[in-house]
Image: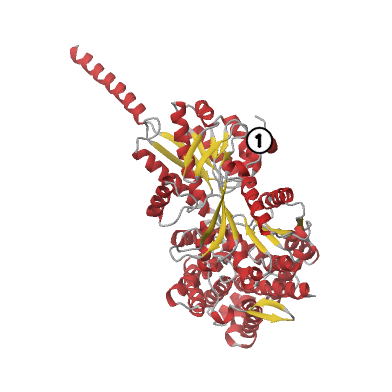
Amino acid sequence: MKRKLFSVLLALSFVLLSFVGAHASTPVKIGFIYIMSGPLSAYGQFAKQGAELAIQEINATGGIDGRQVQGFFEDSTGKADVALRAMRKLVFQDKVDILVGLDSSGVADTVVPSIAQMKVPLIITHAATPDVTGKFCNKYTFRISLNINQNVKAGALIANETGAKKWTTVGPDYAFGHQSWEYFQKYLGELNPKATFLSKDQVAFPPFNTTDFSSYITKVMNSKPDGVFISLWGGNLIDFVRQGTSMGFFNGDFQVLMSLGAATEVLTALGDKMPEGLWVGTRYWFLANDSPLNKKFVDSYYKSYNAYPSYNAHGAYSAVYAYRAAAKKAGSVDKEAIVSALEGLQIEVPTGVVEFRQGDHQAVTDAHWGKIAADPGYPHRILKPIRIFKGKDITPSVAETGCSM
Amino acid sequence: METLLLNTLNGLSWGMLLFLIAVGLTTVFGVMGILNFAHGSLFMLGAYLCMQSMQIFHSFWYGLLIGPLCVVAIGVIVEKYLLKRIYGRNVSYQLLLTFALLLILDDGVRMIWGSGYYVVEPPQILSGIITLFGQNYPVYRFFLILLGPVVGIALWSFFHFTRWGKTVRAASFDNVMAEGVGINVPLIYTGVFALGTWLAALGGALAAPLQSLNPSMGDKIIIQSFIVVVVGGMGSFPGAFAGALLIGLLESFGTVFAGRMQMAIPYILLAVILLFKPNGLFKKGV
């Protein structure tokens, strides 16, 4: 009899112990959705590296809410339906506490409305469409990265300084390219009422899968502009710069602005083939901030991956830290508590202090632009001088975004 | 006038590149009856191996020579150990096998070189600008415009005037009869696939100074090559030439006259050809 009681007690204590043990070791789960395959997989790779670095650092310093952090990575493939499936898997199967990611604006526009039904906080770290913190904004969606308006507003401020009057554009033929041009005309038009913009059939919108840009380069050069605003990015921008160089595009007597020309993947691929003296922008420039936090981030990123962090790496890295800050503020990782904590949260990340603005949840964050310059200390071109535009000066008011929550 | 000239040159240089890729595709189809989905991946591999050989030998010309030959070695292995097993079988096996090859090659390249972008510089002698009627134009593109017809004529002469070429045509016309009169058909198939592979890889190596290298660069070009082949006529040599120039010129002038419709032009052309001339512009015949 005694033996039986003993074994029951033993079994019971095992059950209890395992329960307690399980609770203490249950990690906080973060679900990441990025493009991990196909032509744009480099962007997902950068984000994953940034996220893993942040998770490593946080786990080494006590985790979140006293628990270790675990990252779950899913491939959006850049397609909305795949991204939505990946998000459902992360939320309902892996039971993640928060979602982080999204590269493509097209994907973001489609999945953001269903975030409200899943009731999971989402921090967007790359997709730049104004709509997700504009007409599609909702309680659960936040964005830590620079959006189109902010990046283009800073570009328009520089365009205004150049004194060029007649502007044209080269941009990818989808929402991003067209919206970039639309905002550029709006902002520069406000700054300089004398600025003129070429008509729809005179500007160049090459399709996203273009590899031969020669006819577009010819078209823009023949339209004899004073300034060209280029919103091409990634492989398109690399091809454009090389073909443009061979056709004398950058020797023309017009100003050239590239809204995403300071992306590290573009500068790395082009090396010394990137023409000096162009004005280029990016969502995060690794040399733009002298803060100890940024230095530490750049150093440890370089040590881990032997490259300087791109804006996408920075976005993912910062989002994980923003989540930790929100959990600290809320005192738990309960999803609703996190959403309330993220709202209005101010946090210092490598790029500077950012604030998730109440009203539309867009981070008020600085924009980085600069002039392309050579520097023997770096394997690729860098920015000199660097221009930093304060978040409050380039972020449109909530009323302008069309967001109502 | 300037616009006309520049767009013609743009269209021709792009068309010649398309021709090199399409002619390999159409030859393999014409002789072996294989529609090779992995042709674009061989193009991509040509560009990567050209880049890699350039890093070792520091010369574009070595890259152009060695890169495509390495791809040919891969092509021969693919034909001897994979394609050979499916010649007698249903067409769906071809599609599955070559599509699987495409996926394997794309991901293999991603594993070796990563998913970032690479660029290749044209050789010094071809990197300048020529002034023509007051317009500046890159020398490298002239080089492409001249090279296309040279390769085309060389191939055409090979098939029409040499004993080997005639043997290949005989084998493609009736492989059972050819085998009956003592022609080594399996050897010819290997040779033709190697030739097709070399043309794709050469196209890739020649495209490398124009466009950035990325594991999926082949996927973009394979679609246009298919259109060229269908427009010109499946298996037709002059058809590939005419089709490639037609697509190249239409795309180039499309940016001037068609605006956003430019994207649709190759597909509209494809639909029109399929409706009115389903066999393509040129009748089949290697």
Snapshot quadrant of residue B200:
bottom right
Please provide percent x and percent y for residue A181.
70, 52
Q: Nearer the viewer, residue B109 or A189?
A: A189
Residue visible at 57% across and 36% down in the picture: A142
Please provide percent x and percent y for residue B172.
62, 76
Q: Is residue A234 above or below residue B162?
A: above
Q: Is residue B34 above or below residue A285?
A: below
Residue visible at 54% across and 78% down in the picture: B123
Q: Pointer 1: what residue?
A: A398
Quarter that holds the C terminus of chain A: top right
Please provide percent x and percent y for residue B283.
74, 74
Horizontal arrangement in the rendering, residue A134 relative to residue B125 (left or right): right
Q: Is residue A348 visible?
A: yes
Q: How many numbered marks, from 0 up? A: 1
Q: How is the image coloured?
A: secondary structure
Residue visible at 66% across and 63% down in the picture: A255
Q: Is residue A262 above or below residue A88?
A: below
The local secondary structure at tag 1 comes to helix
Question: Of the residues shown, which amino acid type is indicated by label 1?
Answer: Val
